[in-house]
Amino acid sequence: MPKSSSGAGSADGKSRDRVAISNRRARHEYFILDSYECGIALVGSEVKSIRDGRANIGDAYARIEDGEVWLYAMHVSPYPFSRIGHDPTRRRKLLLRRSEIDRIIGKLNEAGLTLVPLKVYFQHGLVKIELAIVRGKRQWDKRQAMAERDAKRETDRALHARNRGGE
């Protein structure tokens, strides 16, 4: 049965829902307690730069000011073919429902919690951000996580070797 394509993108829809930028360091540096999907207010040239993967959320964080959520320190390189430039590190408004913002405010009242973007992706042609409430890991937490990851890797290798030898 043939698949029909509507609008831009491939017929199978894979190019529409894809991760453009991810913050791999966040999963190493923080315990992720809760996450939210939110939209972001961008100008056209920023969307094209993000589509090209010319953005960085490694140092980005979010704050709630006057009942609105703002993203800081996300670097979006200027699109080279745009006539109008933009400030690469300007603050950008995140689009969440009022109930979600109230829930986030309630959770952030606890000491040591912050908002960090985990990934930027496209969903049906719109730019979305996965925003997480996180708590910072201490050095021994990071070492413990690395030890657990190494132990799991060794176990998987041993099981894989045993299964290959038994055939």
Image: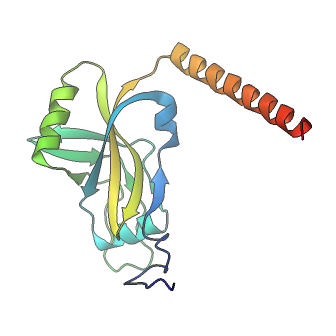
Q: Is residue 154 left or right of residue 66?
A: right
Total number of numbered discs in the rendering? 0
Q: Quadrant of residue 142?
A: top right
Q: Residue at x 19, y 50 (%)?
A: 96
Q: Residue at x 45, y 79 (%)?
A: 9
Q: Position of residue 111 (x, y in %)?
A: 25, 18
Position of residue 125 relative to residue 97, above or below, is: below
Position of residue 118 relative to residue 85, above or below, is: above
User: Which quadrant of the rendered structure holds the C terminus?
Assistant: top right
Q: Is residue 46 left or right of residue 166?
A: left
Its colouring scheme is rainbow
Choose between 56 and 39: the one closer to the eye.
Answer: 39
Q: Residue at x 85, y 31 (%)?
A: 162
Choose between 89 and 142: the one closer to the eye.
Answer: 142
Q: Residue at x 31, y 60 (%)?
A: 87
Q: Position of residue 30 (x, y in %)?
A: 43, 28
Q: Quadrant of residue 62?
A: top left
Q: Position of residue 25 (x, y in %)?
A: 51, 37
Q: Position of residue 27 (x, y in %)?
A: 48, 34
- As drawn, which residue projects farthest toward the left? 66
